[in-house]
Amino acid sequence: MRKTSSAGASASPSIIDQHRDAIFYLVLAVFFAMGVLQNTLPILFAPGLTGARIAGYATLACFAAIFAFFHFTKKLEAAAIALLTATYLGLGWAALNQGGGPATALIYIPFLPMVATVLLGRRAGIISAAISIIMMTVYTAANVNGYTTPTPHTPHQMSLLYASGAILLTIGVAMHAVIYEHLVKNAMNAAQKAQRELQEKADELAENREFLSTVMDSINEGIVAADANGKLSVFNKQARAMHGLDAMPLASSAWPQTYSLYDADGETLLAEKDVPLFRALNGEKVSGQHLAIVAQDKPKRFFCSNAAPMRNAKGERIGAVATMRDITRERVQEEKISRQNREIDQFARVASVDLQEPLKRIVATADTLRDAPEVKDSGRMRNELASISSAAKRMGALIKDVLYMSRLPIGEMSLQPVAARECIEAAIDLLDINEANCRLDFRFAGSPEIVADPHSLTLVFKHLIENAWRHAPEGVKPHVEFTWIVEDGAAVLGVKDNGAGLTKEEAERVFLPLERVRTSENEEGSGLGLAICRKSLTRMGGEFWLETEPGEGCHFRLRLPLAEAKAMAS
């Protein structure tokens, strides 16, 4: 029945807005009742009615049916007009056919367009006024041309008719005034309440915006956000400082050029599809992407960016947000460490040749002299030369271990699924060990598949087996056991010997570089083996520890992730 204006669309509906149709029907019903009464009174006071009066009832009934049809088909404006028309017909026909007395009913007619205008709007008021004019013209013409048959009444009847008309008019006007005043007051109160609530919401929203802006500006990372259409909407203080610019209404294709976004190398302009915020707008979650910003008149800086799409309560994508953390200092430090590592690696390569070569000559010379005829018969000389050769070999092993340990932090590791037993057997093959000089027991069937670097893990087992073999009690055949269990998604492997065991204090020192516990001067070993084992396992993401008691031997344990558990986690 009524079109809502755009200005009021955002405000809360008033009482009139909420109940306009129902109240209009109520007012029309009052006037409709007046028409029925004005047709009924003559029956009471003038029993000799003609068929013309009965036509008034027929007209009211007909238009009431039309009103019901439009009402139930949800055509409310048409229903209202039908009810108005029925009221005009009923009142007018009664007035004309009752000889002038009920003509007071015609006074109601101007009120109907006024009610229609107030409650339904200008269009309904114009239609109502037009119907009023047409009906009054038709009835006037009918009366002038003798189409109506007024019935004379006695003065008493006329007084009653005038009184009834005046009473009905007074009741109708009073009801209209009361209803209208009530509606206006309620509407004004509702409008004032809505205005207060709207102002409170606006103040709360402004306060929340200020709070959010302050929080974002206090974060030590750049934060940028865009709406679902790709319009940049948020640039916090750090983001503005990084780019030297604020958020601008740009197409996403212009972001890399405008905001100086480059690839991690700092030389290649970032493609639109690789911008973290653009990726997030397309539903992708970005984590740890490295990029560079080369803003005008600013030094090149490197950043680590994370980005994610934003969704509302319905799960619909409403935009995206990205953060940028300055990693320039870390990048410079990494480059410095990388340069130092290259220098260490270069030194290690040179040292492995320059330090090992003299030792090889010493060993070769000592072995040659020991076999010379001049010293064959001298046991003392042969022993001294054997000691020189042994010491040179130990020195060579020490240099080799030191160089290996120094290169551990920078060496490449290839972590992959590997069978633990294969690494153990490969380590045994590297040593001069067999069942004749050492008992080896595998306390498990099959072979657990773990995630490790095969070469590094083989060297770890080599060190552990060699350590167990070398530290067996004198006169006792070495006995090495290999164990494993599954614990919290990881394989815990073990190498256990039948040595003398260590005290708690000795166990704490055994992993220190160049620390040798309970060894003789003639015993081989660099004192770096267990330190190398721990560092290698740490690099592989594992753990390494010792379980020992005096007289119970040593049980070295190493924990590495199972390949199956790693795959499931990935």
Image (tube, rainbow, N blue to C red):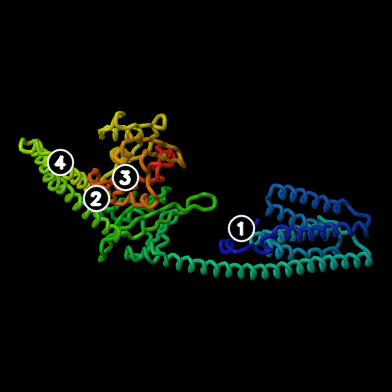
Q: Is residue 295 visible?
A: yes
Indicate the secondary structure of the residue bearing disc 2. helix
Q: Amino acid at mark 3?
A: Cys
Give the Cα separation between the discs numbered 2 and 3: 13 Å
* The disc label shown at residue 3, or none: 1
* The disc label shown at residue 278, or none: none
Of residues 468 and 177, which is closer to you in this image? 468
Answer whether labels 2 and 4 touch (C-beta < 8 Å). Answer: no
Kindly indicate the quadrant of the structure image that contains residue 168: bottom right
Across and down, in percent, residue 7 comes to: 56, 64
Q: Amino acid at mark 1?
A: Lys
Mark 1 burial class by Cα count in 10 Å: few <14, some 14-19, many 20+: few
Image: 359 above or below 303 = above
Give the quadrant of the N terminus: bottom right
Indicate the secondary structure of the residue bearing disc 3. helix
- First reached walking from the N terminus: tag 1 or tag 3: 1
Residue marked by disc 3: 533
- First reached walking from the N terminus: tag 1 or tag 2: 1
Across and down, in percent, residue 537 comes to: 34, 45
Q: Is label 2 or label 3 in front?
A: 3
Q: Amino acid at mark 4?
A: Asn
Mark 4 burial class by Cα count in 10 Å: few <14, some 14-19, many 20+: few
Give the Cα separation between the discs numbered 1 and 3: 83 Å
Indicate the secondary structure of the residue bearing disc 4. helix
Residue marked by disc 2: 406
